[in-house]
Image: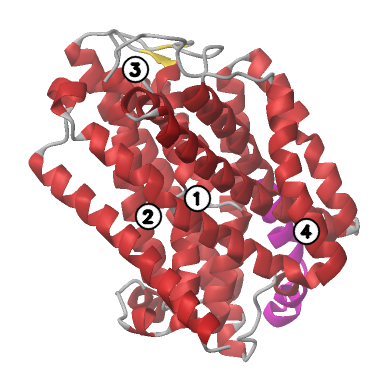
């Protein structure tokens, strides 16, 4: 693998945040805190809402076990991203370019761009739906309005990366507060909720349940987040000694783990509210975010429940869209060594998402957005293997990682996660193909 130290990942913010050398545990943790929350927003974006609402309304609390398992996988995989970025100074896209042939890298880049476009589609639709629900803006105009959010990111990046992190943490906190209120309103049965976190073999046997489960997996463990995290962890300016790099790995992993447990709460809350309010009230076919919004206040008897739901959706969509922009910049620069102005990169990504959204709305109606959201998450899940396998390969390579290489037990667990992801996706493809044959 080439060790040519070319342009660093996200050069405009690379090593821009100072780390105190002699200070307390908490001050250091605060200095490293931030990247984990930028990654975590991808785990609670509007695509998650669609799959969680559909899963909760149709199957009750059963798919909570999938959310929990997906979150554990995410914690492991994001910790490997931290390890790769700190140990090598390379993000995942750059490491792929160093290791694989140009043809393989081009294929991986195309697949990653498809995943980013699918993710951006979910965020765009989520924000547009929120604008429609809260302010009555027609969905087709909401889709166009959300294309302008690139201006927010450009303004904040110019001020410093901490401003981007602060905005994202504020938006994420808004989502958390809103759903804490929704759980209080819905009063779920605690025993049944806890039982939902236990694995249920019916998930594998039931094709419809499996489809939504893999959608949850795709919405939770996002492929572009692996590229993003291995890059933004390098915004911290740690000393390049072995001890300080181990310290950077420790604190950055704590940061991402805490942020992902917050994402676990959000995802669980969405499904729990959907199950408590819809599944057990006879509304088991609620799959559209719009239906959930309209039904929440009447079924709960709380006037503001629907408005709180809409506010959380808007905050979720806007926080997620900021990180998709950064991920797109990272993979294009990493795989192709090709750099676009941030505004142009954002515009290109949005156009790829706007086109299918507008086609669906114009030709199939506004009711098609829920199916489109779930389908976008299944696409993400299908792309996941092509990011996970290289990540595990690199972090298990002693020649590349040196003393920071994965331990034997970490290699075993990481390999098992990769096998689970690949197996579930192959099963989904097989079931989908058989379903087509039976039509």
Question: Which residue occupies 16% across, 44% down?
Answer: 411
Q: Which residues are magenta?
A: 294-315
Q: Are marks 2 and 1 in contact (CB under 8 Å)?
A: yes
Question: Which residue lies under the disc numbered 4?
Answer: 129
Residue 210: % across, % down: 43, 75
How far apart are labels 1 and 4 at the CA level?
19 Å
From the image, tell me which residue sits under label 3.
Answer: 89
* Quadrant housing the N terminus: top left
Asked if disc 3 and disc 1 are in contact, CB closer than 8 Å, the reply is no
* Numbered disc in front, either 3 or 1: 3
| Nearer the observer, 252 or 311 | 252
Of callouts 3 and 1, the N-terminal one = 1
| Residue at mark 1 | 43
Question: Which secondary structure lies at badge 4?
Answer: helix
Element type where label 1 sits in the image: helix
Q: Nearer the viewer, mark 3 or mark 2?
A: 3
For mark 2, what is the residue? 71
Circle 2 — which element?
Answer: helix
Nearer the N terminus, badge 2 or badge 1? 1
Task: Decide if residue 324 is on the left or right side of residue 202.
Answer: right
Q: Residues within 10 Å of mark 4 (few under 14, many from 20)?
A: many
Residue 296 x, y percent position in the rendering: 70, 74
Q: Earlier in the sequence, mark 4 or mark 2?
A: 2
């Amino acid at each position: 693998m080439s060790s040519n130290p070319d342009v660093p990942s996200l050069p405009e913010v690379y090593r821009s945040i100072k780390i105190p050398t002699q200070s307390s545990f908490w001050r250091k943790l605060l200095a490293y805190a931030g990247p984990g929350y930028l990654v975590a927003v991808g785990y609670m974006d509007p695509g998650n809402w669609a799959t969680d609402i559909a899963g909760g309304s149709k199957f009750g609390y059963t798919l909570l076990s999938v959310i929990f398992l997906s979150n554990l996988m995410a914690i492991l995989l994001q910790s490997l991203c931290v390890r790769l970025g700190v140990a090598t100074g390379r993000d995942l896209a750059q490491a792929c370019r160093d290791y694989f042939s140009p043809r393989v890298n081009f294929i991986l880049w195309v697949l990653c761009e498809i995943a980013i476009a699918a993710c951006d589609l979910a965020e765009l639709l989520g924000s547009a739906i929120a604008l429609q629900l809260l302010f009555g803006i027609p969905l087709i105009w909401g889709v166009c309005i959300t294309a302008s959010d690139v201006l927010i990111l450009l303004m904040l990046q110019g001020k410093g990366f901490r401003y981007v992190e602060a905005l994202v943490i504020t938006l994420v906190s808004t989502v958390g507060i809103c759903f804490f209120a929704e759980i209080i309103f819905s009063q779920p049965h605690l025993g049944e909720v806890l039982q939902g976190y236990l694995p249920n073999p019916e998930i594998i046997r039931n094709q419809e349940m499996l489809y939504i489960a893999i959608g949850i997996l795709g919405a939770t463990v996002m492929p572009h987040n692996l590229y993003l995290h291995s890059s933004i962890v390098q915004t911290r300016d740690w000393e390049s000694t072995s001890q300080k790099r181990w310290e950077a790995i420790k604190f950055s992993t704590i940061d991402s783990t805490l942020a992902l447990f917050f994402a676990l709460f959000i995802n669980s809350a969405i499904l729990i509210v959907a199950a408590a309010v819809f599944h057990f009230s006879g509304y088991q076919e609620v799959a559209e975010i719009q239906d959930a919004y309209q039904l929440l206040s009447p079924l709960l008897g709380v006037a503001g429940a629907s408005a709180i739901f809409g506010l959380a959706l808007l905050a979720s969509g806007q926080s997620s869209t900021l990180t998709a922009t950064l991920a797109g910049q990272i993979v294009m620069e990493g795989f192709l060594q090709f750099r676009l102005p941030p505004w142009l990169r954002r515009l290109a990504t949005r156009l790829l998402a706007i086109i299918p959204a507008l086609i669906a709305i114009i030709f199939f109606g506004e009711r098609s957005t829920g199916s489109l959201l779930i389908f976008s998450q299944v696409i993400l899940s299908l792309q996941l293997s092509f990011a996970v396998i290289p990540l595990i390969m690199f972090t298990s390579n002693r020649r590349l990682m040196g003393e920071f290489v994965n331990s034997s037990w970490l290699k075993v667990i990481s390999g098992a996660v990769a096998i689970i992801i690949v197996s579930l996706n192959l099963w989904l493809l097989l079931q989908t193909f058989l379903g087509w044959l039976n039509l």
